[in-house]
Amino acid sequence: MYGQPVYILKEGTERSRGKDAQRNNITAARAVSEAIRSALGPKGMDKMLIDNFGDTTVTNDGATILKEIEVSHPAAKFVIDLAKTQDQETGDGTTSVVVIAGELLKQAEDLLDMDIHPSVIIEGYKLARLKANEILDEMAQDVQFDDDKILRAVAETSMSSKIVSGEKGSLSDILVKAVKSISEEKDGKMFADIDNIQIQKKKGGSLTDTELIDGIIMDKEFVHADMPKKIEGAVILLLDKGLELSKTEIDAKINITSPEQIQAFLDNEHDMLKEMSDKIIASGANLVLCQKGIDDIIQHYLAKKGISAVRRIKKSDMEKLAKATGAKITTSLEDLENYLGKAALAEEKSIGDDNMIFVTGCDNPKAVSIIIRGGTDLIVDEAERAIHDALCVIRQVIHDKKVVPGGGAPEIQISQKLGDFSMGHTSKVQLAIEKFAKAMEIIPRTLAENAGLDPIDVLSELHGKHAVQGGHVFGVNPFKAKVDDMAKLNVFEPISVKKQAISGAAEAAEMILRIDDVIAAKELSGGMGGMPPGPGGMDEDY
Ligand SMILES: Nc1ncnc2c1ncn2[C@@H]1O[C@H](COP(=O)(O)OP(=O)(O)O)[C@@H](O)[C@H]1O
Ligand SMILES: [Mg+2]
């Protein structure tokens, strides 16, 4: 018996244990973090990503970069998931969270080299991340709902690292107005659901032509040339039903033996369509918005009565239209008058080379749209991502009512205060907290490096400023390439973006450190089920 190997794992299973497992995971996670470090901050570079269909994306957004790159290592995938969570929870800080996680792991490696047990590192990191939240609370500044200056500053800070930064002033004005107009009071607190802001993209013009519309926009035209292009006092019918005759479901054969019979058959069809038109006309609607198709004959009858109609509208737009105009979407043509909604104006206008329909002056003022313009599709797409981030940070500040200065100021503050906090713990835990404190410097360090500054000088200057009472506002000004007062420069971020980035990164690092055994089953050959390799073929759905 003895001396015989005992196999408990299936043949082909790969296993790495202890330090090997840890090192592999750390290396993979750090590689992802290193890859996007150069994108951080206003002077961060953009990445051009080309997928295997040849579609190109140019972006500076951490979550988007990580979504597009294809990694196979599980620990690397885990870090990418971290950016996804950050995006879902707060909408911004996706590059930061990954960069911080990478640095926490790098610092942990030093501790592992000193033979400190991972469980001690994990304990120290946990204490440090909880303390970091307290330090953020202490340095935060309160913001009221009507403090547009700070709300705009937060939006501008979020946009300053993106392609839209040249227009951030005018855009932040639009975005703050948009979020405030859809905000509602619930249980004494202001609440903003930014899904109520409709975003439309239209290539052409420039970013400065981006507009806020008080209402809903459809990338559509009226179906018939004779229909009115401008309807004042629109009475709106929302139909989720095709205005056409459905084809017979069963393959029926009709025997026609004389020309009269053909005529009778066609007349019958015409009558049915006419009857549908009459029902709509009788309802009193002057604007028909249909999710499905509209037959030519119906188009003709509606146009004759001066009723405008749009077909094949997206379901999500139909829902927004229903909310905005008070109309109820109906699937039948009976009792239509009970389903109608209202808007002051519906109008077809040309935007760029195309026409779009604007429904404005709606009953419900909590329906707004932003129409994004820009020279190329790449610009419009990246502008949409930047605007999404900015809308999220405005929402976050409305919810948390607290901001912290940006530019690496909170990270330096945490780094310094954790130094004091580490005293009084056992020597090894103290070391772990100190390493956590050191890891926080990665944000100002990277901002400085990306702005071409010497990181050592910058960090020592920042520590000097933060050591003095009231110095917590100092961070890196990448535009002037110097240490500067972020509050004076109006560089602010929502406290929840920072809290989520630091806690999320720390939790991820702790989880990776906790793994000491990796058991990987043999890969199934052809196990992808014939899917193409690369993004889209994987089970990652983002
Ligand atoms: N005008 C500015 N001056 C200094 N720092 C800024 C400025 N604008 C943004 N930052 C900083 O840049 C960092 C965010 O960079 P960004 O590329 O948007 O990454 P993330 O995906 O993490 O949000 C934050 O630390 C923020 O404070
Ligand atoms: Mg950002």
Image (cartoon, helix red, strand yellow):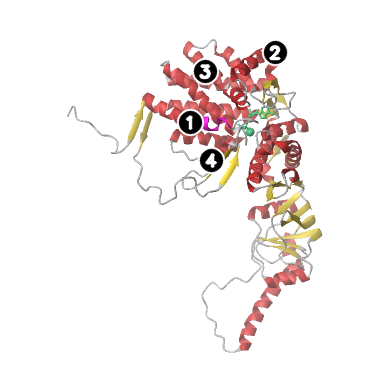
Which of the two labelled residues, at mark 1 and mark 2, occupies the earlier sequence position? 1
Looking at the rendered structure, the kind of residue marked 1 is Ala
Looking at the rendered structure, the kind of residue marked 2 is Gln
| Whole-number angstrom distance, CA of label 1 to CA of label 2 | 38 Å
Task: Give neighbour class at mark 1: few <14, some 14-19, many 20+ (Cα, 10 Å).
Answer: few
Task: Give neighbour class at mark 3: few <14, some 14-19, many 20+ (Cα, 10 Å).
Answer: many
Which of the two labelled residues, at mark 3 and mark 4, occupies the earlier sequence position? 4
Check if mark 3's residue and mark 4's residue have beta carbons within 8 Å: no
Q: Tell me the SS state at disc 4.
A: helix
Question: The N terminus appears in which quarter of the rendering?
Answer: top left
Q: Which residue is mark 1?
A: 31
| 87 relative to 141, above or below | below
Chief SS of the magenta region: helix
Q: Which residue is mark 2?
A: 469
Report whether the residue tagged 4 is closer than 8 Å to ligand 1.
no
Which of the two labelled residues, at mark 1 and mark 4, occupies the earlier sequence position? 1
Q: Which residue is mark 3?
A: 435
- Give the image location of residue 330, x and y in percent: 67, 61
Residue stretch in magenta:
31-38
